[in-house]
Image: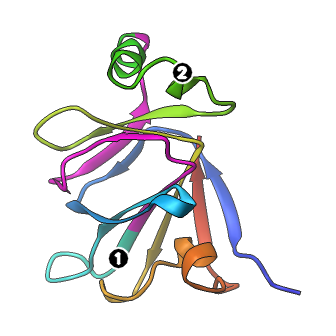
């Protein structure tokens, strides 16, 4: 039997005071991965994964990242952007992404984050359904 990682629930907003970039979008899995690699300023790597993605407005690099729930005004603006029918799916949420030069959002079912010591080119443990089996001792943070 496959061991699954530990999942800890967290509340939004999620604040990451470090730069992120768009790392991977897997349309067949409706997954969007943002990554902040380890390097001179950071001793670890942080991945943020959105699952069940149906709409995205995003620049490729964010100077820092705060993910929060959309206000009612922002939700109306997103509905105008993508159409109310896109937002009509069960459980879909509008995640606003602050930290770039303009407003950004991801409409998705869920958001997860992980922190590890891997190098930037290594696959994300959050994409275990795409890249392979999860590492059982991983701890994933689920936001919502």
Is residue 92 found left or right of 82 in the rendered image?
Answer: right
Q: Nearer the viewer, residue 76 or 99?
A: 76
Q: Is residue 68 magenta?
A: yes
Identify the element where label 1 is drawn.
strand
**Whole-percent x, y for residue 103 in the image:** 22, 32
Q: Nearer the viewer, residue 28 or 25?
A: 28
User: Can you tell which of label 2 and label 1 is closer to the viewer?
Assistant: 2
Is residue 13 found left or right of 7 in the rendered image?
Answer: left
Numbered range of the magenta stretch: 47-72
Quarter of the image that includes the N terminus: bottom right
Identify the residue position indicated by label 2 in the image. 85
Q: Is residue 93 magenta?
A: no
**Mark seen at residue 71:** none
Among all residues in the image, which is located at the extreme left?
101
Is residue 61 found left or right of 65 in the rendered image?
Answer: left
Identify the residue position indicated by label 1 in the image. 45
Identify the element where label 2 is drawn.
loop
Residue 24, relative to residue 142: is it above or below?
Answer: below
């Amino acid at each position: 039997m496959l061991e699954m990682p530990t999942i800890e629930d967290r509340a939004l907003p999620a604040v990451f005071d470090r730069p992120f970039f768009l790392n991977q979008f897997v349309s067949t899995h409706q997954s969007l991965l943002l990554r902040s690699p380890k390097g001179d300023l950071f001793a670890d790597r942080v991945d943020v994964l959105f699952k069940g993605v149906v709409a995205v407005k995003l620049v490729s690099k964010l100077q820092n990242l705060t993910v929060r729930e959309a206000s009612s005004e922002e939700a109306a603006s997103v509905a105008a952007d993508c159409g109310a029918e896109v937002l009509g799916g069960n459980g879909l949420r509008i995640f606003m992404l602050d930290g770039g030069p303009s407003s950004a959002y991801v409409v998705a079912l869920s958001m997860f984050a992980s922190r590890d010591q891997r190098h930037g080119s290594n696959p994300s443990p959050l994409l275990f359904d795409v890249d392979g089996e999860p590492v059982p001792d991983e701890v994933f943070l689920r936001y919502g």
